Amino acid sequence: MERHEIETFLALYEELHFGRTADRLGLSGGRVSQIVKTIERRIGAELFVRTSRRVEPTELGRGLYHDLHPHHLAILEAVARARRAARGDRRTLTLGYHGTYMGRIAHRAATLLADARPDLDLRLTEVQLGDFVEPLRTGQADALLAPLPVEEPDIAVGPVVRRTATYAALAAGDPLAGRETLSLEDLADRRFPAPPGSVPAYLWDRHLPRTSPSGRPIPRTGSGFATYAEMLAMVAEGTVVTVGDSQLPDYYGRPDVVYRLLTDAPPLTHGLVHRRGTDGEDHRALARAVVEAAARLELEDSADVKDGVPA
């Protein structure tokens, strides 16, 4: 099908009226009819049922529309991007991230996005744990790789990009450090840190529950911190134990802190979040790049582990 045939077919499907289709395309009604008949002869069946009162697509016509429409949109978007790039009309998005592994995903996504969208610049910024999603509200970031759940009325949650096992972080001298694995029940005699900064209670309670599985309370200290480094310094001193995903043992190793798998804790997740109402094509392109980046890194890390190299 030629471009003008595709556009005529799509327009008639959406308008279901030869006159409106003709007006929309700047053609005569007779020309629209002629083009549609040409397409039908080439395909070998009717795409529309026409009567004096109505125009309705056939089942074949519906299938052809749903097959063609997304590809037509993609072509239009590709041409529009090329025109913007030719004019030097570049736009910028800022992606924030929490933690080292999310930083890896962000940097890989930036590389992928540069290839897919040369008209779109992606800036990266690390967000401290205590800031939670505030950079989205202040305009410091347009999207954020953040721990989930995020249940804020002004924040939309996009794809989950990572799901990992849960680990406890303890001082190297803690009696529990000698065990290979732990349970939440084991932590009931320890103290968790209080949530930092603007981190909401629902997120902290999901990661660091207030009670053990049997109902024993797990107390919290009011000592403040804002970063992973400050939190782990409290752990090393034996002030608190804490809980996190696999990036803790993978990227935050230190001689005075040990990490042990929590066998009864649910997995922890990170996802891409953004302000509600900011879900245009630029954000969708970013989401695609982030999902692809996360998938590629997971495959690469799995291959490294199989080869005996730490991820």
Image (cartoon, grey):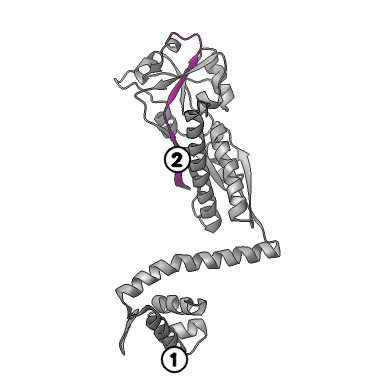
* Disc 2: CA contacts within 10 A as few (<14), some (14-19) or many (>=20): many
From the image, tell me which residue sits under label 2.
Answer: 150
Lower position in the chain sequence, tag 1 or tag 2: 1
* SS at mark 1 in the image: helix
Q: How far from the left and from the top, in percent, is residue 13?
A: 39, 76
Q: Eyeballing the image, is 252 above or below 107?
A: above
Q: Nearer the viewer, residue 172 or 311?
A: 311
Magenta stretch bounds = 156-175
Q: Eyeballing the image, is 156 above or below 148?
A: below
The answer, for residue 229, to whether it is visible in the render is yes
Residue 278 falls within the magenta-colored stretch: no
**What's the CA distance linking mark 1 and mark 2?**
55 Å
In this rendering, position of residue 150 left or right of residue 252: left
In this rendering, position of residue 214 left or right of residue 195: left
In this rendering, position of residue 143 left or right of residue 266: right
Q: Nearer the viewer, mark 1 or mark 2?
A: 1
* Disc 1: CA contacts within 10 A as few (<14), some (14-19) or many (>=20): few
From the image, tell me which residue sits under label 1.
Answer: 30
Q: How far from the left and from the top, in percent, is residue 164?
A: 43, 32
State the residue lying farthest toward the right. Answer: 88
Q: Nearer the viewer, residue 143 or 310?
A: 310
